[in-house]
Amino acid sequence: MPNRKTDTNNQKGFSTDFIGQNWDYPEASYEERERIVDHHRQYQQGLMWTLAYHPRIPKKVRDKVSVWGTCKDEYEREDGWQNQLYIREARRMISDYVMTQKNCERIEVVNDPIGMAAYGMDSHNVRRYVNDLGFVENEGNVEAYVEKPFPISYRSIIPKKSECENLVVPVCLSASHIAFGSIRMEPVFMVLGQSSAIIANLAIEKDIAVQDLNYNKLKSVLIDKGQILE
């Protein structure tokens, strides 16, 4: 990365992940969301300060961590910490078709693809609790292999017709937690974004609901525009 930066991620049982403290965010008010973001920032700041300066941390660790700082060429805050919380997964639509683990493993293969995904089914831990023996445990980490690319259904990015007829949803699509762990990658969102634009354009041209498009016609346009569907 430029300017000697690092893209720091989590690792091991206790890490940069503020496990379980994001649960209220999707349904929270804007004020409550600000508090949640502040709590996440405070946790990150406290973790980094502890690793860099706390006397109970081994000196070799403190010496290594303390040479790092916040980015000097990004973000609007004077202290270098960003305002935007990284939100990997939010509320998602439930449509007539829900992408699941079976699709990722190609146990079920859809017949109306509008793009492909290929990343592993991936999730960080979602909660931390004390078990019956008094030990602290993390729960929810998933790192499941996807053998080969799998198709994403046209029906998973359009809502039920009874709910809305002029909406296409490429990101918060109809998918289970596990399936979304694979689909969520930015290149896939770019693919779904292109397909969504084509769907919207065809529906506008024909003055019909997005659910009423002829899939074979849609497929031919997608292929003509370079989409890979199998």
Image: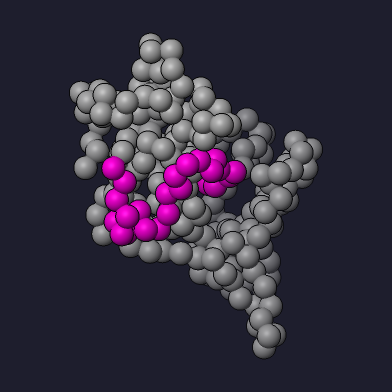
Question: In this image, 77 relative to 182: left or right?
Answer: right
Q: Which residues are magenta?
A: 88-111
Occupied quadrant, residue 63: bottom right
Question: In this image, 216 relative to 33: left or right?
Answer: left
* Image position of 31 with respect to 68: above or below: above
For the point 29% across and 51% down, which residue is it?
109
* Image position of 136 with respect to 149: above or below: below
- Please tell me which residue lies in front, 205 or 151: 205
Q: Position of residue 89 (x, y in %)?
A: 54, 47
- Residue 226 seen in the figure: no
For the point 75% across and 36% down, which residue is it?
30
For the point 62% across and 38% down, which residue is it?
84
- Residue 75 seen in the figure: yes
Quarter placement of the C terminus: top left
Question: What colour scheme has been applied to the protein in the rendered image?
Answer: one colour
Q: Position of residue 100 (x, y in %)?
A: 42, 54
- Please tell me which residue lies in front, 170 or 30: 170
Magenta segment includes 145 = no
Q: Position of residue 12 (x, y in %)?
A: 51, 69
Taken as a whole, is the magenta stretch helix, strand or loop? loop
For the point 35% across and 43% down, which residue is it?
152
Quarter placement of the N terminus: top left
Q: Position of residue 59 (x, y in %)?
A: 58, 70
Magenta segment includes 103 = yes
Question: In this image, 149 relative to 59: left or right?
Answer: left
